[in-house]
Image (cartoon, rainbow, N blue to C red):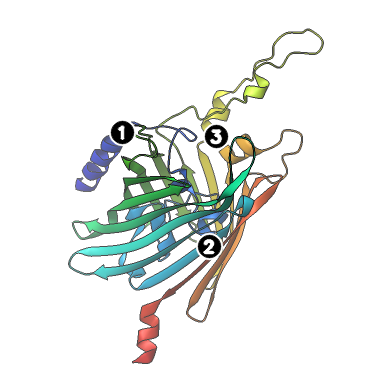
Amino acid sequence: MKHYFYLIVFVFSVIRANAQSGGDNTYEFLNLSSSARVAAMGGQLVPVKDNDLNLVFGNPALLNPEMSKQLTFSGVGYFADIKYGYAAYAQDFEKYGTFAAGMHYVNYGDFTETDNTGEVLGSFKAAEYSLNLSYARTINNDSAFTVGATLKTIYSSLEDYSSVGMAVDIGANYYFEKALVNLSLVAKNAGRQLTYYRDGNNEPLPFEIELGASKKLAKAPLRLSLVLQNLEKFDLTYKDPAKENETDPITGEVTEEKITFGDKALRHVVLGAEILLSKNFHIRAGYNFRRRNELGVETKMSTVGLSWGLGFRISKFHISYGRATYHLAGASNHFSLSANLGEFYKKAQ
């Protein structure tokens, strides 16, 4: 009963938080997928608990002793020559729990600076960083129920404007061993700016609540995942201003963009699947309903919202690749490399 009590307290504490939806916030780079595996699974993967340190970026409760001495790097070639990545290291202390430190960054590249007449004045850069410190431990020495937190120190530099902020992620995970099911709940990016781009202009952070479940089939090499994102706000629909004044060419009546209840509900859903062909080779795929609905072109949806990837091990290195289609204009390519330094120490000894 204690396990359920802790879980209920956690649920009610995070639901009380105030939140904003995407597009209304600063530090939106915090929502970028951190690894090739996560990108391949639809961009959200909070309920899978194994030894992949990259998953801690999405849910600190997934941090566990199996990740101790693991070092991981991820890099992404994003749109418009934007590049971002993530690096992290974990260490377990038997008496105190497991800790991890990571750096999440995005480099927007070089920009040409001009005045209001178009005369070139020079160039400038833009980049954002988040230093993450994570901690997790089991409750009452019960390995089935884990809680964790990540403290984020954020720095953003956009030309001559800069800002510093702090945020925290709080997560919980429960593993039902007999059913091979993981259930996770996480509240992300609860915090505020400490210094502002402009004096007195305090902007909200991209707070989000996610609930996820994963199921490993007992007699098949398959793991399925379901994530419900942005639970702090039900209606996530974006109404295109260009469509607000559209008129019927025959009747002349103004047409309204109708969004059904089902459409609103599905925008929260992210589906993922992993085919575990062996310990050293996995195939992954995902589907993000919101991404497809908001970024797809009605006349040609193609593979918008779909993602896929591979994960394999060569010697002591784990390598992953993921590709996520955002729009007909292109897709993002994600690469991750990780290794457990403890394995190298054993060989040296």
**Residue placed most toward the observer, 321 or 24:** 24
Which residue is depicted at the point 18% across and 56% down?
A: 140
344 vs 335, left or right, is left
Closer to us: 19 or 221 = 19
Residue 179 at what x, y percent from top left?
40, 54
Q: Is residue 63 left or right of residue 6?
A: right
Residue 46 x/y as whole percent: 42, 51
Which numbered tag is attached to residue 266?
3
Does residue 321 sit above or below 17 in this rendering?
below
Q: Which mark is residue 75?
A: 2
Indicate the quadrant where residue 304 lies.
top right
In the figure, residue 48 lies in which quadrant?
bottom left
In the picture of the structure, the residue carrying the numbered disc 1 is 17
Rendered-image quadrant of the C terminus = bottom left
What's the residue at 73%, 13% (across, down)? Answer: 247
Q: Position of residue 234 (x, y in %)?
A: 46, 28
- Residue 226 left/right relative to 207: right
Disc 1 versus disc 2: distance between alpha carbons? 32 Å
Residue 78 appears at what percent x and percent y? 59, 54
Disc 1 element: loop
Can see residue 112?
A: no
Labels 1 and 3 touching (C-beta < 8 A): no
Frontmost residue, 318 versus 128: 128
Q: Earlier in the sequence, mark 3 or mark 2?
A: 2
Q: Nearer the viewer, mark 1 or mark 3?
A: 1
What amino acid is at disc 2? Gly
